[in-house]
Image: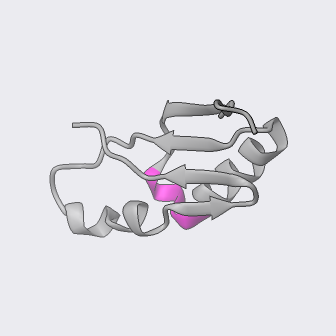
Amino acid sequence: MADYYEVIGCLHIHFHLNDGRQAFQHLGDEASYAGLDFLITTSHTPKTHRQKKEWVFRESGYYGRTLILGAEEL
């Protein structure tokens, strides 16, 4: 058994928050096609009405074979 495993991914991915949950599905489809194991988003969440964008964190999970983690750039 190997001591190390290669994990390939991308971090600091921006996307249009207005695209909603469909954006995560699209990102997951494309990332899986590219062979990525993970993808970490970093949205610029508006200071006003932050609660409207909390779905970004709830939608974290596997999309295809790629794990997408919702994050926030402050």
Looking at this view, name the residue that lies furthest to the left: 48
What is the quadrant of the N terminus in the image? top right
In the image, residue 56 lies in the stretch drawn in magenta: no
- Residue 51: quadrant of the picture: bottom left
- Residue 48: quadrant of the picture: bottom left
Name the one closer to the observer, 45 or 68.
68
Figure check: 21 above or below 19: below
| Residue 7 in the figure: left or right of residue 49 | right
Image position, residue 18 (x, y; %): 46, 57
At horizontal 29% and vertical 48% (from top left) the residue drawn is: 45
* Magenta-colored span: 17-22
Image position, residue 35 (x, y; %): 79, 38
- Residue 21: quadrant of the picture: bottom right
| Residue 69 in the figure: left or right of residue 46 | right
Name the one closer to the observer, 33 or 7.
7
Image position, residue 54 (x, y; %): 32, 66
Figure check: 53 above or below 7: below
What is the quadrant of the C terminus in the image? top left
Colour mapping used in the image:
one colour
Image position, residue 44 (x, y; %): 32, 41
Main secondary structure found in the magenta portion = helix
In the image, residue 20 lies in the stretch drawn in magenta: yes
Looking at this view, name the residue that lies furthest to the right: 33
At horizontal 50% and vertical 32% (from top left) the residue drawn is: 11
Figure check: 14 above or below 23: above
At horizontal 29% and vertical 68% (from top left) the residue drawn is: 52
